[in-house]
Amino acid sequence: MLRSNNRQAPYWRLVAMLPVIIIGFISTIGTGGGDGGGDSDPRFEEKEPFSFEVTVVNHDQFKLQGVNGEITITGKSGADSVMVTGIKRVQSSISAQDAKEHLQELKVDWESLVNEVSVETTQPKDTAQRNYGIDYTITQPKYFKIQVDSANAILTLDSIDNDVTVNIANAEVTLMNIHGSALVHLANGTIDGEVFLPLQGTIDLKSATGDIHLAIPENTSAEFSATTFFGSINVSSNLVFQDEVTTSTSHSGTLGSGQGIISLGAMGDISVSGL
C-alpha cells in the first residue's frame, strides 16, 4: 500500500507547493489552458461518442490523464477488461462548422503496457475561442490501482479494492467504497470520501481552497492529523482518539493502534465521520 513520508511537513508548505506540482503535470498532458477553453460562453457545440475495450492480461493498474470533463471510474468484480466509453466535446464561439472541424483535434489515446492500461486526452495547445472536453465512463477490475491526473474534472471513483491517486487543479472528487490508500491533491475544489483504510495504509487528502468530508470505519487504525486555514474541523463522537490534541484549526491523535496515516489539509471546512 502507498505510504506517506510527509507526516512532519507543515501544511502551509504543502499548500504552497500544490500549484507548482499541478502546473507541472498539466504541462505534461499538453494543454496550454487549464480550463480547456477560450470563450466563457460559447454558442456552438459538437459532440462525438467513442468507446473501446482493453483485455486484461497481466495488468493491475489504470492511469488516466485528462484535461477537462466528467470522469467516472467503477470497479467491477470478475471484470476481465477495461471498458472505456465517453463523449468528446468542442464548444466554439465562432460557428457550428468551426466546432465540427476542431472536433478531430480532440483525441483519446490509449496504451496497453506490461502491467498498466493508460488513457490520455490530447488537445490543441491553442484553445482560443473554443472549449475542449472529454467525459469518461470507465469500468475496470476492482483490484486495479488507479491514478488520475487532470486540469478540470468532476471525478467519481467507486468500488475500488486498491490504492487511488488523484492530482487535479480544479475538481469535485467523490470517493465511494474505496478499500485502499487514497492520495488526493487539489488546488481548488472539494473532496468527499468514503475510505476503508488497510493496515499501514495512507489517506492523504489536500485541497488548497476547498472542503474535505471523510468517512472511515470506527475501527480504523491510524495516526490522525487535520489542519484548516479558515474553516472548522468536526470529528464525530464515534471515533475514539488517544493522545488527542485539538485547536481551533487543527485536530490530531491516534485511532486504534495507529498503524496507518490519515493526513487532511484544507483551506475550508473538514469533517470526519465514523462508519
Image (cartoon, rainbow, N blue to C red):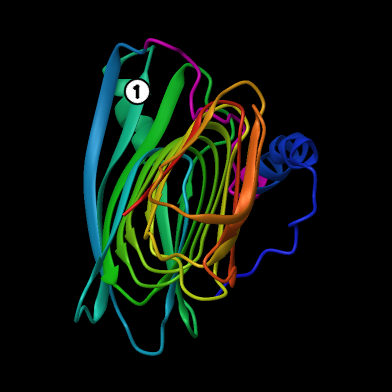
Describe the element under mark 1 as helix, strand or loop: strand
Residue for point 57% across, 31% down: 34
**Lateral position of residue 112 relative to residue 7, left or right:** left
Residue, disc 1: 91
Quarter of the rendering occupied by the N terminus: bottom right
* Mark count: 1
Quarter of the rendering occupied by the C terminus: bottom left
Classify 237 as above or below 169: below
Residue for point 37% across, 19% down: 92
The quadrant holding residue 105 is top left
The quadrant holding residue 95 is top left
The amino acid sitting under disc 1 is Gln
Mark 1: give few (<14), some (14-19) or many (20+) Cα within 10 Å. Answer: many
Which residue is situated farthest in the bottom direction here?
58
Q: Which residues are magenta?
A: 26-41
> How far across and down, in percent of the image, does residue 205 sit?
56, 47
Residue for point 65% across, 29% down: 249
